[in-house]
Image (cartoon, rainbow, N blue to C red):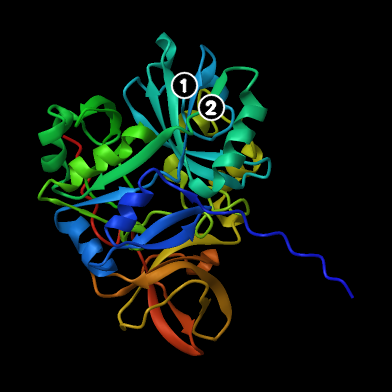
Amino acid sequence: MSHEPSAAPAPLLNTPLHDLHVELGARMVPFAGYSMPVQYPAGLMAEHLQTRSSAGLFDVSHMGQLRLVGPEAAAAFESLMPVDVIDLPAGKQRYGLLLNDEGGIIDDLMFFNRDVANGGDIFIIVNGACKAGDIAHIQNKIGSRCEVIPMPDMALLALQGPQAVTALQRLAPGVEKLVFMTGGHFTVAGCDCFITRSGYTGEDGFEISVPATQADTLARALLVQPEVKPVGLGARNSLRLEAGLCLYGNDIDTTTTPVEASLNWAIQKVRRTGGARAGGFPGADKILSQLADPASLTRKRVALMASARVPVREPAMLENMDGQVIGQVTSGLLSPTLNQPVALAYVHPDYALVGTELFAMVRGKPVPMKVATTPFVPARYYRG
């Protein structure tokens, strides 16, 4: 009896900083098709607290970068998302959601208007695991209206934490003038960088797009600064969860709408019913009706916090007082900052009110949790 050999998994890709991670003693793991550092010898807890107290440097080069060019780029891109692209001023960044025709989330992303109206571009950063699909989707839907230009030769670093600005302005004077969700071109340690004041940790900080050939030089120049230490994916996850931010594939996916995901804040008034450019995005009828009638929802994303120190992790089921299943945890861990279990979950809307008590089932035992507000740890974005 012959067995067909199963297809070998595709070899992992390396980011331009792979050799540096190995040199720094990182524990490398597969993530989004790449070999990525999950933690360095200091460990997840130390790296998490380093970012909260000083500054952490993250390699996020697995993420996708692309540009849209042409006079119709803003209008074209707006047709794919329930957000305001057309009125985003030059020099500003915004959070966006690519949707399918059922209103499900294909990916969440960040986009920046680099003066597209005057021959510049819309610069987009998408999630690593989704980038090939996202680029194909965008090309397929709007490639006839604007140029869709992937940027595979660019790396991406994130410098996050209250001391990030102190370290970066030493190498890039003027960067301290940026405020949250703005950006610009800077030369840092001889490297050609596009820097935005943004991130995924809830702290002040920066994301730095740099040619892959210059990434190692830039990373080493930043790590020499006394405030900065390297941080892996483990702490990146615990930091974003404390900040109450969604992880694509866990907390949002193609089966969840922005309204179910409690991302209503990301849908500007101009795209809602009664707005000047209402609708006109994939799944608009469904999403606009969910916004108009929240009672129509069958589930809603909430934040949960427990008082007992029992870590509650995904995919723990959630039960009400009567032992009925009313939801499921999508992200959860013991918060290093608060020393309490925190989680994001989907629950039946009857249980979505802040203060509602429910129970997470951990190894067959109920752990009491309460619906909380996010962020769990106050955000410290710099707004000037």
Mark 2 / mark 1, whichever is N-terminal = 2
**Amino acid marked by disc 2:** Glu
Q: Quadrant of the C terminus?
A: top left
Image coordinates for residue 254, horizontal then vertical, percent? 62, 50
Q: Is residue 237 visible?
A: no
Picture residue at 22% right of the left edge, 26% below the top: 187
Q: Quadrant of the N terminus?
A: bottom right
Residue placed furthest toward the right? 1
Most foreground residue, 96 or 291:
96
Image coordinates for residue 117, horizontal then vertical, percent? 43, 12
Number of disc labels? 2
**Residue annotated with mark 2:** 78
Most foreground residue, 102 or 335:
335
In this picture, residue 72 sits left or right of residue 334: right
* Mark 2 and mark 1: Cα distance apart in space: 7 Å
Q: Residues within 10 Å of mark 2 (few under 14, many from 20)?
A: some
Q: Are marks 2 and 1 in contact (CB under 8 Å)?
A: yes
**Residue annotated with mark 1:** 86
Q: Is residue 314 visible?
A: yes
In this picture, residue 34 sits left or right of residue 245: right
Q: Quadrant of residue 354?
A: bottom left
**Amino acid marked by disc 1:** Ile
Image coordinates for residue 303, horizontal then vertical, percent? 40, 64
Above or below, 159 against 141 in this view is below
Picture residue at 44% right of the left edge, 74% below the top: 313
Residue placed furthest toward the top? 118
Above or below, 300 against 189 in this view is below
In this picture, residue 342 sits left or right of residue 136: left
Picture residue at 74% right of the left edge, 64% below the top: 6
